[in-house]
Image (cartoon, helix red, strand yellow):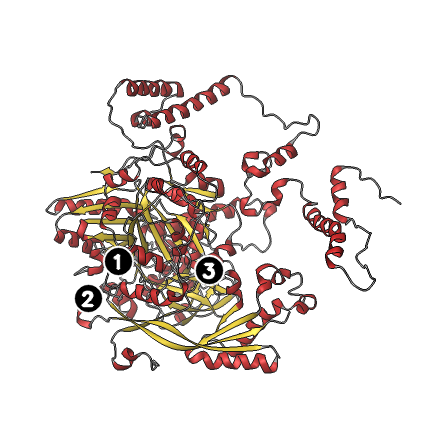
Amino acid sequence: MPPKAPPNAKKARLYNSRNIRTHLSDSSFVDKEKLNVPDFLGSREFEIKSFELSQLNSKYASSNRVFQSLPRSLRRRAASHNVKRIPKRLRAKALREMKNSITGTPPKKKHSRGRALYKLNMSKKLLKLGNNLKLLGTLPDRELLGKKLNIRTKIKSLNKQIRELKSSTNSPLAINNKVGAYDNTGYGGYASRPMGNIKYHKRQRQFVWLPTHIWHAKRFHMIKQYGYQIPLSPTQKCFRLMSRQSKNDSIAFDTSYYSSLIINIEDDDVFKELLIFITKFHVAIPDKILKGERAYNDWLYIEGQQIGKGFIFAHIASHTIIIRTFPSIYKDIFNHCENFLMCSSGLNSIYDCQYSLGSIDLVGPLSLLSLSKILHIYDEDKSSNIKKLWSVLTSVKDTKAIPIGFNFSFDIMDPRFWNKSSRTKHNNDSDLDAYYDAIASMNSTTFLDPTSVKNLSTREGRTKSYENQMSIKDIGKEFGKISTRSRSLSPEILKHSRIPILLSKTGDQSWTLIVPWFWVLPIWQKLVKIKHVIPGGIKQMRQVNYENGKPNFPNDYPWLRDGWENNLSLDSLNREKYYKLPKHLLNSSRPDFTDLELISPFHCDWNFLRTITLLQKFSGMSIEELEKDNTYADYGEDLFIRQINSGHDLLQLSKDVRELHYYRLPTDISISLFDEELEFHQKFITGNYTINQARYVNIVSLPVIQISVKLVGKGRLRDGARIYLQETDPYNYAAIVGFITSGGYNIQLGIASGIGLVKADISIKGSTTLYIRNIGQTSYYAAEAIIIKT
Amino acid sequence: MSTTANDKIVKNERIAGRHIKHSPNVRIESAVERETTFLVKSSTPFVSAVKKIQRSLDKFDKSMISSNSRSRGKTKYQNGEYKKVNYIVVKGMGKTIEKALSLALYFDEELHYQVDIITSTVKVLDEFREQVPEEAKQEFDDGDEFNDSVYRKRSVSSIEVRIWVKR
């Protein structure tokens, strides 16, 4: 019986996927003994082919749309109705699939009319005018962009600007390229925010776009923070991927939101003095840092106070210091340095380069190797020191032997001139020996090209690097001229751009690449195409730090301003989330937080820890004494201060005391990192201190130490979990000794781990066992803790 | 610290400073190589090494695919680049040679795998970071990251055990 005819196309496809058609004639047994293999195969050709076809059929049987056969990394949001989100080779098919079954054509979008159409036309015109200006070698008037004008007035004044430019024969060019790259450095103050393309200017007025913003916005969740739009995390699931990537390959981050400043100091003594002023060194700066051989990557100080970690590259030969910090502490550092320079003698200057230097961070063992595939050294001298070292170092997998802080500086060519990323050629036999020699040579030789350092750190140098920067279109045209087989453009064009870079090793397996702002995008575009590199956002940065047991800025530093504010915002966000959930969605396993006034269950309540610790000292009672039964509240002479006779009194008083000092701002930080030079801290760890009045507990800040913990057995760890010395009643809040600032399951270790802070009087020697309880739960987990040296 | 005969410099002089050992395992590997190489550390327990090696051998064993429910459907190791894999490499150097040899014998005699043993020498790099004298310590706070280092190459015996997969 012939098979039933399928009712529709989809069913037909499904039926096809179940059938393998066969070819029955078989004449390969010629003599009935010998099998003629070519003949046999020839006769089976049809069968084999249809078998293969059936495999494909069954693979795509359940898929409706062409993009479903794409690997996940190539899929894009909203691809089902926008063909432009599908790779070109699949677009024709995608269009066919989008066809309306009734009319046979894709549904047409409704044509805008009236006001909407007018607006669209106008904004298109704006885009054109912006481009015309770029071609004329200038940028739109900054004042025009700052004003709140309607599009018509904007277009009018742009037209005027263009007319003036065209009529004047020798007007000075503001920019030296067609792509709109310009150096935006602030001298004698902060730089103005970058303008961006005129049509998209308005949306980056408050939060500056990174050079790779458009690339990231298509593929990442973005957040607006610190005056930038920062990539948060890829839209795709990537937790395990990133973990593996950081272990075996490499992750890249666009960190252009880290802000840089450049200081020029002619006088060498002042130069050293400034470095001592802001770094951890008290007496002298190591020679290696002064010469630029090593970068300083550690705490920055303002008047002896740690304010955050930063990167400093100093090069005394060219009188230059580059300081790169997290954006939230940048202005403090900038003002601090500016004040220092005003009071010091000699010629000096400070430049705000937050929008003129960009950077890319890489983490993972293959970072340097991946970079070497796109960074082609611009150097006439083939046998130069740097080139030799570069080729040796990039021939190995593990760059752990390279000292941390090591700096490279050289010029590169435009990476887009190469068709495919390519590894430097090596002869494999002498690899290990050459590598060891190179490592040994790093101890004594510098690998800095002085002109490159100068070009990167001066406005003229950076502007020069943008000269005739080629657009993607230009490069495409050049590629059209050469044969498809050649790896790169012709040698004359390769010398078209000369880009100064600074590459520094910032951690065991992490590197930072500092380049002029408008070169970040070309480098990024090539970098993400390399097999070993996967891009990440700040969430991934935190994940990598967490998995390596390193504290992450700002959330693991609650004693600093940014960490404190981060912790406070966690409180309000979690609180809102807790109360927002509608009743029918509540599940029974959700903890019922009853003691909200005592201790906040939504974040690490350092304020509570401080108050309870110091009040206990004030009461002069031991923990055993405090376990007595409750009595009625007993107020002494001070009507506000309850006498402490039991543990219950202590908790109640801690609540009262915090309310008593309502004039204290929540942003006042109630903890500080243990510093053995401070008198109170010394007394605190021995216990030889006194609290005379209950009110004082709001003024004293609690010394804490940072620890990294690892659970001994199975268990879960969450942010904000509470740390105890032993298992106790969960309601015994007075027994808390610290909090976990970031905790979770660590897939590198295969066990739950975390980073936290405990009171400084908890003695942690070697590895100590502590007990940890998650918020809202009753089980305790034993954990091994070690001190993190911060 | 053990010294070898062909490294005269280390034998004759004692270098002061913190000794940092650098891994000689720096060659860029392919994904297949990464999966088929097992490095024996001095801290590796013998039995866990046996289990790990056995697990990677099983991946290539066709007979295991149908019987073992955990590896069911994993035809990945029968195709493509993995098809060319003939043996799992177990490497050990210095004091782990003994452990690597025990592993070789265990797989040879107890589990009846074909085993090759190849000896060789590996060059390793020693770094000696100068210590700051106590009185000068205040100057550079803590850590010795910016101190000068002395580097020495040293040769260490090593062994490579090839355990042939059963296909």
The chain containing the residue under callout 1 comes to A
Of residues A132 and A759, which is closer to you in this image? A132
Residues at circles 2 and 1 in contact by the CB criterion of under 8 Å: no
Q: Are callouts 3 and 1 both on one chain?
A: yes
Q: Which residue is mark 2?
A: B138
Taking depth in this image into account, of A286 and B160 the one nearest to the observer is B160
Identify the image quadrant of residue A581: top right
The mark nearer the N terminus, 3 or 1, is 3
Label 3 – label 1 distance at C-alpha: 26 Å
Residue A248 got which mark? 3
Mark 1 residue type: Arg
Tell me whether circle 3 and circle 1 mark residues in contact (CB < 8 Å): no
Q: Which mark is residue A595?
A: none
Separation of residues labelled 2 and 1 (CA atoms): 20 Å
Q: Nearer the viewer, mark 2 or mark 1?
A: 1
Residue type at mark 2 is Gln
The alpha-carbon separation of the residues under discs 3 and 2 comes to: 39 Å
Residue A477's x, y, as percent? Answer: 43, 34
Q: Amino acid at mark 3?
A: Asn
Residue A407 percent coordinates (x, y)? 29, 55
Taking the image as drawn, is residue A360 in sight?
yes
Query: Callout 3: few (<14), some (14-19), or many (20+) C-alpha neighbours within 10 Å?
Result: some
- Mark 3 lies on a secondary structure that is helix
Spot occupied by residue A384 in the image (x, y as percentages of width and height):
27, 55
Q: Are marks 2 and 1 on the same chain?
A: no
Q: Which of label 3 and label 2 is nearer to you?
A: 3
What residue is rendered at 70% in x and 50% in y? A52
The subunit carrying tag 2 is B
Residue B36, relative to residue A26: is it above or below? Answer: below
Which residue bears the numbered disc 1? A294
Q: Are marks 3 and 2 in contact (CB under 8 Å)?
A: no
